[in-house]
C-alpha cells in the first residue's frame, strides 16, 4: 500500500490547501480535548464540512483528542467521540489509554491512532499498544532510523513518523517548562513554547550573554527530506508534517515538496539528486528557522540546537489569488512588490510560472505602481489561468 502523506490543518481554509496540494490525509483539532489550544481549531460544523470536502477528494480526516486528561477533562468526551463518528471522521489521535478504550466502546467505527505524546521509542511499547487494540502508532520524534527499521521489521502495527516541523526541547509531550513559567499546561493544550524564548545565561554569577545575543534552548526544526527515500524503503504507513498553527502558504509549500519526493520515488524506485535538491529549495521558500535531520541519523549534537533564536520573517510570499477571469486575477496583497518585478505563480499542480508585473489597478480602477498595503485588493494580468489555491511569490529561481 502506498505511504500516506499526512498534513496539518489549523482551520478549514488550510485544510483545503493541504488537500489541493497533495495530502492523502489531514489532521485537525476540535474546540475541545486538543493540544493546540491556540490554533483556530474546528467546531463540529467545521469538522463536518472538512470531512465532506476531504472525502470527496479521497482524503482522510483525523481529529486530535490528544490532551493528557485529568478527571475533570472527561466531561462530554463520550458524546464528542460519538459526534465525530457520526460525522464520518476516519480516526482520532489520542495519547491516553482511557480515551482509546472509550472510543473503542462508544465510537468503534473510528480508528484510534496513538499520538507522539506517548513518546513511543521501542518495540515493546509498540506491542503494548497493538495489544490494546490501537489501530496505528505515531512514533516519538526521538527514534533514529536504525531503531525505526527494527520496529517496522518486527511488527504489523501501522507506524507513523514525523518528517517535518517543530521539535520539542524535551521528549515530545513530557515538557513542563511552560507549566512552571506561565502556568499553562503543555499537555492540556496550553504550551507557551518557552524553550524558544530568549534567556540570560550565567555561569558562577558571570553573565555569558550580551543584550543583543540572548540564548534559547530550543531545537532546530525537523526537515527529513534527505531521509525520505530511506523512510519509503521501510514499511511505515504514514509520513507526518507538523504545523497546525502554520500559514496556508507554509502548508502548500511543504506538502507539495514532500508530495513531489514521494511521487518521484513511487514512479522510479529512487529519488534523484536533482529532484531532492529542487524540493529542498522549495521547502526553504517558507522557512524562517534553521532545520536539520532530527534524530534520524542518531542522537543530535550541538548542531541540532538553536542557541540564539533569531527568527527572520520570510517575505517571499507576496499575494494570494481571490478570483480569475479572462486573463485578469484579483489578488490580495501580503508583501511588497511593484510594477516590473518578476513574480512566480505557485499552483497545486505543475511547474511554477514566472511573469513580470504589468499594469496593476485597485478596486476603483486606479493604476497602482507599488503594492505595499497588506490586504489591499488589486487586479493584475497573469499569463495562465489561476484560482483561489494559487499563491504569488517573489520570482527568484
Image (cartoon, grey):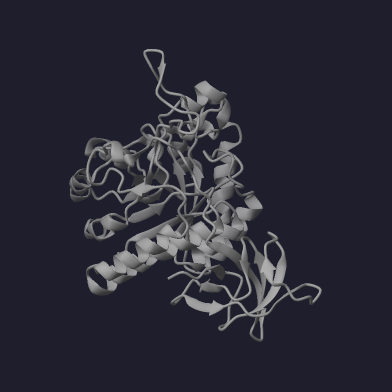
The image quadrant of residue 309 is top left
Q: Where 22 falls versus 37 (above or below)?
A: below
The image quadrant of residue 227 is bottom left
Of 140 and 347, nearer the camera is 347
Name the spot of residue 153 as percent of width and height, x first: 18, 50
Residue at the image point whose x is 52% and y is 32% from the top: 188
Q: Where 109 falls versus 187 (above or below)?
A: below
Quadrant in the picture for the C terminus: bottom left
Of 109 and 209, nearer the camera is 209
- Outermost residue to the right: 364
- Asked whether residue 135 appears in the rendered view, the answer is no
- Outermost residue to the bottom: 326
263 horizontally vs 251: left or right:
left
Name the spot of residue 49 as percent of width and height, x first: 62, 60
Residue at the image point whose x is 31% and y is 51% from the top: 158
Name the spot of residue 249 as percent of width and height, x first: 53, 60
Q: Where 161 falls versus 271 (above or below)?
A: above
Amino acid at each position: 500500500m502506498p505511504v500516506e502523506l499526512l498534513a496539518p490543518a489549523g482551520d478549514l481554509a488550510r485544510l483545503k490547501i493541504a488537500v489541493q496540494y497533495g495530502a492523502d490525509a489531514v489532521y485537525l483539532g476540535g474546540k475541545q480535548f486538543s493540544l493546540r489550544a491556540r490554533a483556530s481549531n474546528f467546531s463540529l460544523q467545521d469538522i463536518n464540512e472538512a470531512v465532506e470536502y476531504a472525502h470527496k477528494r479521497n482524503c482522510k480526516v483525523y481529529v486530535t483528542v490528544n490532551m493528557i486528561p485529568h478527571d475533570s477533562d472527561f466531561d462530554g468526551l463520550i458524546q464528542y467521540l460519538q459526534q465525530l463518528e457520526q460525522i464520518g471522521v476516519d480516526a482520532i489521535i489520542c495519547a491516553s489509554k482511557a480515551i482509546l478504550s472509550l472510543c473503542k466502546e462508544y465510537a468503534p467505527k473510528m480508528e484510534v491512532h496513538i499520538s507522539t505524546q506517548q513518546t513511543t521509542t521501542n518495540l515493546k511499547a509498540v506491542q503494548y499498544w497493538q495489544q490494546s487494540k490501537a489501530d496505528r502508532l505515531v512514533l516519538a520524534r526521538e527514534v533514529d532510523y536504525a531503531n525505526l527499521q527494527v520496529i517496522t521489521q518486527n511488527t504489523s502495527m501501522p507506524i507513523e513518523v514525523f518528517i517535518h516541523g517543530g521539535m520539542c526541547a524535551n521528549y515530545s509531550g513530557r515538557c513542563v517548562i511552560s507549566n512552571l513559567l506561565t502556568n499553562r499546561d503543555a499537555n492540556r493544550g496550553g504550551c507557551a513554547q518557552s524553550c524558544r524564548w530568549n534567556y540570560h545565561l550565567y555561569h558562577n554569577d558571570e553573565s555569558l550573554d550580551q543584550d543583543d545575543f540572548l540564548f534559547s534552548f530550543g531545537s532546530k526544526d525537523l526537515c527529513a527530506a534527505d531521509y525520505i527515500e530511506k523512510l519509503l524503503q521501510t514499511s511505515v504507513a504514514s509520513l507526518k508534517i507538523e504545523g497546525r498553527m502554520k500559514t496556508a502558504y507554509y502548508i502548500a509549500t511543504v506538502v507539495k515538496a514532500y508530495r513531489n519526493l514521494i511521487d518521484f520515488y513511487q514512479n522510479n524506485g529512487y529519488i534523484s539528486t536533482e529532484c531532492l535538491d529542487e524540493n529542498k529549495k522549495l521547502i526553504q521558500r517558507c522557512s524562517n528557522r534553521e532545520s536539520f535531520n532530527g534524530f534520524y541519523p542518531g542522537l543530535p549534537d550541538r548542531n541540532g540546537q538553536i542557541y540564539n533564536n533569531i527568527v527572520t520573517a520570510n517575505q517571499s510570499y507576496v499575494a494570494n489569488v481571490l478570483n480569475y477571469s479572462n486573463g485578469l486575477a484579483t489578488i490580495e496583497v501580503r508583501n511588497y512588490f511593484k510594477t516590473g518585478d518578476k513574480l512566480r505563480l505557485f499552483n497545486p499542480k505543475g511547474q511554477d510560472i514566472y511573469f513580470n508585473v504589468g499594469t496593476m489597478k485597485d478596486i476603483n480602477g486606479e493604476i497602482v505602481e507599488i503594492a505595499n498595503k497588506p490586504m489591499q485588493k488589486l487586479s493584475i494580468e497573469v499569463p495562465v489561468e489561476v484560482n483561489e489555491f494559487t499563491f504569488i511569490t517573489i520570482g527568484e529561481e
